[in-house]
Each structure stands twice: as structure tokens, then as C-alpha cells.
């Protein structure tokens, strides 16, 4: 870590250019993404729009009593109904605000996933939703921090244990860390798609896409579990998925935090050459001094830990 | 094991946290169900009625064709013949923004396999980048706050000054990021103020249901500045709201922990934590094992 006076001074002097550089990188990244999505999705969408128009004309031709205007109006009605989250097929439209659905909505609100396949429509519900999220989001952050901290503590404990056993601390640390990363990857990102493809009938790739979009809290809502009225879902399914979301989010937050600290460290590296970063926890601590939504608690916990060890 | 940190006290704390969380979720589920079920049933009935009347009015139409039509309609885009399509450049940019900020409205989502895979990797690097960027912004904001705090600082009045700065910060931020923007939205988009505020909050908290999205009405003409301004507002607002949520989480945790633990332990721990939090730019000394 930088010496205090030098570090502070450097940070102050480099503060504005660094922000600028970051801003430029950010904008460049956004531009890159938009070009890519534009190129990937644009043609497909134009195709499907064409097909849709054609279908509409066919319908109008085949059923001559229909008027275009009435059909348009009806289509607007369908769009509205679809947006409010009704399943449209057949006679029975499945309601989604039952107890399980509401619970799922609450989860999606306070984890800030926000699938949006359900969203409150009445004014009162919206106000309630705002306040619910206002207190729920910090609560969620605390819980995720807690879980991430426990995971980290478990890994550290394991590595120390192994290190004592084999008298080779560095190797043990490396080993447990790799193990933890691989296990997390398997448990939270690579295996769940199999479950989804078995129960929801998605392909593996779709399941993976859903897993990532959910755990990163992006939550587009184009794929949502347990929302297909034509399928049978076992009762444990949603609970297991809820648990998966909770732990997976904590894990992904840890990983993303690690990425951030690496990113910031690498940009700090030219200023503080003497920095030696060996410990992931150490890096996390350094990183989350500044991180907003991360495992902030890890730091105080580890401080506490070192303190208690010092006492012992 | 002296260094095994999962001691009973912490298990208690975790357990309380988990229980509180679950309780909070259940409470929310109950309330939302209560509030929404009625409206949903109503709109469902209305839709069925509409369908039936449509079928009655146009007798040549058979049920199956309509069902098929409904199915097609349910899957995608906007029903305006001359619409240029959702995935033009500005909307793609907007989409990239919703990915890296994790807002994820979902009014646009990649439908091709390539698009989905790219989206995953794009988010994998974009989300940390976005967080780093927001951190930098937040750091700037809080640094200004600190200098402000030091400037007004007088011995013995630190608490008052701190509270005052915090209040000022909160008020200005609330006005700038939460209270004024809905007026603009309600003017441009034709929403009510309440809807605008709902949109504002759902966006800045990165929940992003996508039931209201700015600049997506195909019947409206938007000036170019509008979307750019909205983007700037989102970035700064996110930094601000993240700070506020952080503050909220800190306060809540401190409060809960102080409440829960035995006074002696709680006091020392709380003091240690608050001390370490008061001067965030002072590098800490880590005793490595």
C-alpha cells in the first residue's frame, strides 16, 4: 500500500485526470456495446417485424369482415394485457399475484433484480413498493455482505487449516482459493442451467443466460422461472431457486468486488509500485474502502479478526 | 480454534438478519398481493371480455386464428407500421447502459444466441467497470462533503456540523435527483407526477421493472438532448443513491448490532467500527498473519 502522505498527495493530484480517464473508458465501453448489440439484434428484429406485419395482412385477408383499425385497437389491448403480466392463451388467463408470485415479486424488488414481468399497477401499491424498496435494499445489502463474509471466512479458515497441516501456506491458500472459485462457478453458474433446462425446457445456453442476468441483478425479465402456465413445477423448485439467488448474488458480488479491486489496483499500480498484493482478502479490503455496494463488512470483520488474533 | 470467527454471537446476528430478511420479504409479498390481486383480476376480466366482444363483432373470425394472433402479439414489438424498430443505435446505446448499470428494464432484451452470450460477457466486465466509475464519482462527492465539513468544523461542534452537512447533502440530492426529474418526465412523457416519481425511484435503485421507460413511446417525438440528459441524470443519480443506500445500510447495521449485542461488547465494537469509518482516506494497517 502507498505510504500515507505520498498516497494522499498522489491521489489528490491524479484525482481529476483519473476520473476523466475512467469516464472516457466508460463511454467507450458503452459505445462498443451499443454497436455490438445494434449489429447483432437489429437485423433479426427487422425480420420479425416484417413477419408480424405479414401475419397481420394474412389475417385481414383471410377474415374479410375484420377492419384494420379494430384489429390495431385489439392488438393494443393485447399489448397492454401482456405488459401487465397476464398469460394470454386460451380461456383461462393465469393470475400471477398469488402468494408465491407476490413473494417472488418482493424478492425481485429488494434484490434490485426487477424482472418486471410483474409490476405494481395501482397507485397505492406503487407507493408501498417505493418504501418497501427503500428499506429493503439496504437490508438486502447487509444480508448479502454477511453471507459473502461468511463464505470468505470459510475459505480463509480452510486455507489456514490446510496450511497448518501441510506446512505450506502459500500453496494451501492458492489451492483453496482456486477450489472456492471453481466450486462457486459450478454451483452458481454452471450447474443451475441443467436444472432450468430440465424443468423449464430452456436450452442450456438460455439457462446460463438467465442465471447470469439474474445473479448480476440486471434482470431483464425475458426469461423468468416458474411463469409458464403450461408446465408443472415441483413445490421445492421456487424455494431452491430463491436460495440459489441469495447465495449466488453474494458470491457474484464477491467476485465482482474482486474485479473492481483488481481494476482499481491496476490503475493504481503505476503510482504505487511497491504494492505487493498477495492476499485476496487484502485486496478486497483495499478495494472496498471505496466500493459502494460491496462486501463492506468483510473489512471490519477481518479487522476484528486480526484484532482478536493479536489479543490471543 | 481462536481464529475461527463464527462465534455464537455472530451466528445469532446472522440468524436475526436472515429472519428479519425473510419476514420483510413475506410482509412485502402479502401487501403486494393484497394490493394487486384485485386490479389484476379486473384487468383480466376486461381482457377476456374484450376478446369475446371482438369475436362476436367479427363473426367470420374463428377462435383459433385469434388465439394464434394473440400468441404472436404477446411475444414482441410495437404495433406501429412505420416504426423503425427497437434496435436502432440510440436504443442499443440505451440498452448497453441498462446492462452495465444493472437496471435492466427488459423492454429490450437480446433474442439471438449470439446476442445473449455477448450480453453475458459484456456485463461481466461492464458491471465492475460501472461500479468503479460510480465509486470514483461517489468518492468525489464525499470528498467535497469532507472538505465542507472541515471548513465549518469547530471543536465541540463536530456532531452538529456532521449532521448538518448530511442533511444538506440529502436535501440537495433529493431535490436534484428525485423531486425535479419527475416534473420533466411528466411534461415530456405525459405521465402523472406520481408515475414519474415511481419511474425515477425504480430506475435509480436499479430495480428497473421496465413498465415505464423514458423515450420509448413511438408516437412521440423526442428532442435529442432529452435522452442524453436522462443518461447523465441516471449516472449521477446512481452514484448519489448508492451513497444513500450505503449510508442506510451502515446505520441500520450499527443500530441493529448495538441493539442486539451486550452493551459492553457492542460499545467497543461500535466504537472501533465508527472510528475506522470516520476517516476513510487514512490507510489502515493490516496485521497479516
Image: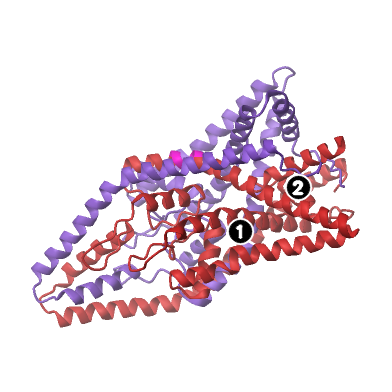
Chain colours: A red, B purple
Q: Residue at x 84, y 45 (%)?
A: A7
Magenta range is A131-135
Residue B136 visible, this angle: no
Judge the density around disc 2: few (<14), some (14-19), many (≥20) Cα neighbours within 10 Å: many
Which of these two is toward me, B275 or B96? Answer: B275
Chain bearing tag 2 is A
Q: Residue at x 41, y 48 (%)?
A: B199
Work out whether residue B3 or residue A136 is closer to the camera in this orientation and state it.
Answer: B3
Q: Position of residue A149 (x, y in %)?
A: 68, 47
Asked if residue B134 is positioned above or below residue A50 in the image, the reply reads above
Q: Which residue is mark 2?
A: A285
Viewer-proximal residue among B239 and B186? B239
A45 and B284: which one is in front? B284
Image coords of residue A178 (percent x, y): 75, 64
| Residue at mark 1 shares a chain with residue at mark 2 | no
Residue B181 x/y as whole percent:
44, 44
Subunit ID for the residue under disc 1: B
Amino acid at each position: 500500500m502507498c505510504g500515507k502522505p505520498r498516497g494522499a498527495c498522489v491521489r489528490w493530484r491524479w484525482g481529476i485526470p483519473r476520473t476523466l480517464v475512467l469516464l472516457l473508458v466508460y463511454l467507450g465501453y458503452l459505445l462498443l456495446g451499443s454497436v455490438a448489440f445494434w449489429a447483432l439484434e437489429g437485423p433479426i428484429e427487422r425480420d420479425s417485424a416484417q413477419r408480424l406485419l405479414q401475419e397481420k395482412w394474412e389475417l385481414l385477408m383471410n377474415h374479410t369482415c375484420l377492419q384494420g383499425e379494430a384489429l390495431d385497437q385489439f392488438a393494443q389491448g393485447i399489448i397492454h394485457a401482456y405488459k401487465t403480466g397476464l398469460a394470454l392463451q386460451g380461456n383461462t388467463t393465469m393470475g400471477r399475484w398469488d402468494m408465491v408470485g407476490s413473494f417472488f415479486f418482493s424478492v425481485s424488488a429488494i434484490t434490485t433484480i426487477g424482472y418486471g414481468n410483474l409490476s405494481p399497477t395501482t397507485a397505492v401499491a406503487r407507493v408501498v413498493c417505493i418504501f418497501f424498496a427503500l428499506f429493503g435494499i439496504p437490508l438486502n445489502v447487509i444480508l448479502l455482505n454477511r453471507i459473502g463474509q461468511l463464505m470468505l471466512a470459510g475459505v480463509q479458515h480452510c486455507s489456514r487449516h490446510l496450511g497448518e497441516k501441510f506446512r505450506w501456506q502459500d500453496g494451501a491458500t492458492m489451492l483453496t482459493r482456486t477450489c472456492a472459485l471453481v466450486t462457486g462457478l459450478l454451483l452458481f453458474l454452471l450447474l443451475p442451467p441443467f436444472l432450468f433446462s430440465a424443468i423449464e425446457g430452456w436450452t442450456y445456453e438460455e439457462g446460463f443466460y438467465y442465471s447470469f442476468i439474474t445473479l448480476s441483478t440486471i434482470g431483464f425479465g425475458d426469461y423468468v422461472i416458474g411463469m409458464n402456465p403450461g408446465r408443472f413445477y415441483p413445490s421445492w423448485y421456487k424455494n431452491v431457486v430463491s436460495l440459489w439467488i441469495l447465495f449466488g448474488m453474494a458470491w457474484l458480488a464477491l467476485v465482482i468486488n474482486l474485479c473492481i479491486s483488481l481494476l482499481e489496483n491496476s490503475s493504481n499500480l503505476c503510482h504505487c509500485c511497491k504494492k505487493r498484493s498477495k492476499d485476496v482478502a487484502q485486496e478486497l479490503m483495499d478495494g472496498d474502502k471505496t466500493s459502494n455496494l460491496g462486501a463492506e463488512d468483510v473489512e471490519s470483520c477481518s479487522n476484528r479478526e486480526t484484532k482478536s488474533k493479536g489479543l490471543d | 480454534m481462536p481464529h475461527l470467527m463464527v462465534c455464537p454471537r455472530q451466528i445469532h446476528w446472522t440468524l436475526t438478519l436472515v429472519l428479519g430478511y425473510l419476514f420483510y420479504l413475506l410482509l412485502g409479498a402479502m401487501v403486494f398481493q393484497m394490493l394487486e390481486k384485485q386490479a389484476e383480476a379486473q384487468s383480466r376480466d376486461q381482457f377476456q371480455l374484450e376478446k369475446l366482444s371482438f369475436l362476436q363483432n367479427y363473426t367470420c373470425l374463428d377462435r383459433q386464428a385469434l388465439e394464434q394472433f394473440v400468441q404472436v402479439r404477446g411475444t414482441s414489438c410495437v404495433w406501429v407500421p412505420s416504426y423503425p424498430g427497437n434496435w436502432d443505435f440510440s436504443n442499443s446505446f440505451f440498452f448497453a447502459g441498462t446492462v452495465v448499470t444493472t437496471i435492466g428494464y427488459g423492454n429490450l432484451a437480446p433474442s439471438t444466441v449470439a446476442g445473449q452470450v455477448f450480453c453475458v460477457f459484456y456485463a461481466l466486465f461492464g458491471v465492475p467497470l460501472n461500479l468503479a466509475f460510480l465509486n470514483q464519482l461517489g468518492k468525489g462527492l464525499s470528498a467535497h462533503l469532507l472538505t465542507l465539513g472541515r471548513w465549518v468544523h469547530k471543536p465541540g461542534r463536530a456532531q452538529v456540523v456532521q449532521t448538518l452537512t448530511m442533511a444538506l447533502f440529502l436535501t440537495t440530492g433529493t431535490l436534484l435527483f428525485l423531486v425535479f426529474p419527475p416534473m420533466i418526465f411528466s411534461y415530456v412523457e405525459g405521465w402523472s407526477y406520481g408515475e414519474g416519481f415511481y419511474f425515477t425511484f425504480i430506475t435509480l435503485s436499479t430495480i428497473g421493472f421496465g413498465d415505464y421507460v423514458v423515450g420509448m413511446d413511438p408516437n412521440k417525438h423526442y428532442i435529442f438532448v432529452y435522452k442524453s440528459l436522462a443518461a447523465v441524470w441516471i449516472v449521477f443519480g446512481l452514484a448519489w443513491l448508492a451513497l444513500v443506500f450505503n449510508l442506510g445500510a451502515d446505520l441500520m447495521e450499527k443500530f441493529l448490532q448495538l441493539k442486539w449485542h451486550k452493551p459492553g461488547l457492542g460499545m467497543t465494537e461500535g466504537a472501533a467500527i465508527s472510528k475506522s469509518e470516520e476517516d476513510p482516506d487514512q490507510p489502515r494497517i493490516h496485521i497479516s498473519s
